[in-house]
Amino acid sequence: MLTQIKDLASKLAPRLVEIRRHIHAHPELSGQEYQTAAFIAGVLSSSGLHVEEGVGKIGVVGELQGANDDGRVLAIRADMDALPIQERSGLEYASRISGVMHACGHDIHTTVGLGTAMVLSQIGSELGGKVKFLFQPAEEIAQGASWMVNDGVMNNVSAILGLHVFPSIPAGTIGIRYGALTAAADDLEILIFGESGHGARPHEAIDAIWIAAQVITSLQQAISRTQNPLRPVVLSIGKINGGRAPNVIADQVQLLGTVRSLHPETRTQLPNWIENIVANVCNSYGAKYQVNYQQGVPSVQNDYTLTQLLQLSAEEAWTSDRVQILPEPSLGAEDFSVYLDYAPGSMFRLGVGYKDRIINHPLHHPQFEVDESAIITGVVTLAYAAYKYWHTI
Ligand SMILES: [Zn+2]
Ligand SMILES: [Zn+2]
């Protein structure tokens, strides 16, 4: 079966590169992926899949029914949105849309998803159940997976697989991670209310800017002294608004930040932990405060059995030296985690780096490029993992 999958994939290679370049040249921002979705629906239909459009607002679902239905449904997820970045790769198939670029490789994810659908559509008789391809919008704004889930795409799903490109791993290599792959990413707003006064007479006022500085410093110090160092928490204040004039003491400051954590248990304690620190500082100096903690996407926690399925599939397909077991998670976020509330799943890293380049630009960089040979690596790994899902689990 592996040889057959590899043959089918290599025959499809030129078509898949063409598909990828088309998507890359026509990127669309999160929540606006209408052309991309229509294009995907067309490819899936012509491969004989049952296609549903407008799922999760703009998403596309393609279903492939295996011959011996055991009732299990395996979902394969790809995201399809681009970023507000002006491409500077200089490639002939670079973005034709000013200020919009596939700089996170979602064009590759979509192409690998389509390639996997095309391959599996030709060996459908070997599948023991249904494969459901989820092409979701709006991953970069961490909304698309929720839109898809709210439309019921996970209702009958038994397991879900996904991938993300990784430029620091060479093309042809697969990165596997057991347990936590990405962090939970939550939004934080802290409002500090002081009292205005003359800049020359601070003792007659309550200086919200100085108190805000104390709050930021206290939070960073408290992470190092009161959070378990083996359970990382990163809190970054990225924006401050406050103050009216150089010689007027500020009466109000707004701090906006992001909070990243890996352990679900730690995460649930963070809102109270932050509020306590803010309260202690503000109470000490007579300021009032408000903390708004908004949970974003949870951490991606890869399921052991499905991660092993991916590892074994990749090792059989490509030999074990082309499979890296990743020692560390990322504190980036990924809304693949939203699906994992409904079924176990695993996401792997698809190496896309050029082996002969000293620098492979990182994700979200205007010169980000991928070695397209990785498309076939991704397709074969996923298609074979889908086959093995019904033959080994
Ligand atoms: Zn991204
Ligand atoms: Zn991404």
Image (cartoon, rainbow, N blue to C red):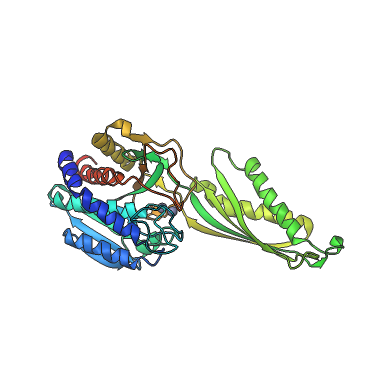
State the image quarter where residue 199 is shown.
bottom right
Residue 72 in sight: no
Going 51% across and 58% down the picture, which residue do you hit?
A: 295
At x 28% / y 40%, what residue is drawn? 309
Q: Position of residue 376 (x, y in %)?
A: 26, 45
Q: Is residue 393 above or below residue 90?
A: above
Residue 20: % across, % down: 29, 54
Q: Is residue 381 left or right of residue 268?
A: left
Residue 200 appears left or right of 352? right
Q: Between 54 and 165, which is closer to the camera in this rendering?
A: 165
Q: Quadrant of residue 42?
A: bottom left
**Residue 262 at x, y = what percent?**
49, 45
- Confirm whether residue 87 shows in the render: yes
Residue 221 in the image: x percent, y percent?
A: 67, 44
* 70 vs 141: above or below: above
Q: How many marks?
A: 0
Q: Name the image quarter holding the N terminus.
A: top left
Residue at 24% across, 34% down: 316
Toward the viewer: 68 or 261? Answer: 261
The residue under the point 25% across, 56% down is: 132
Quarter in which the C terminus is drawn: top left
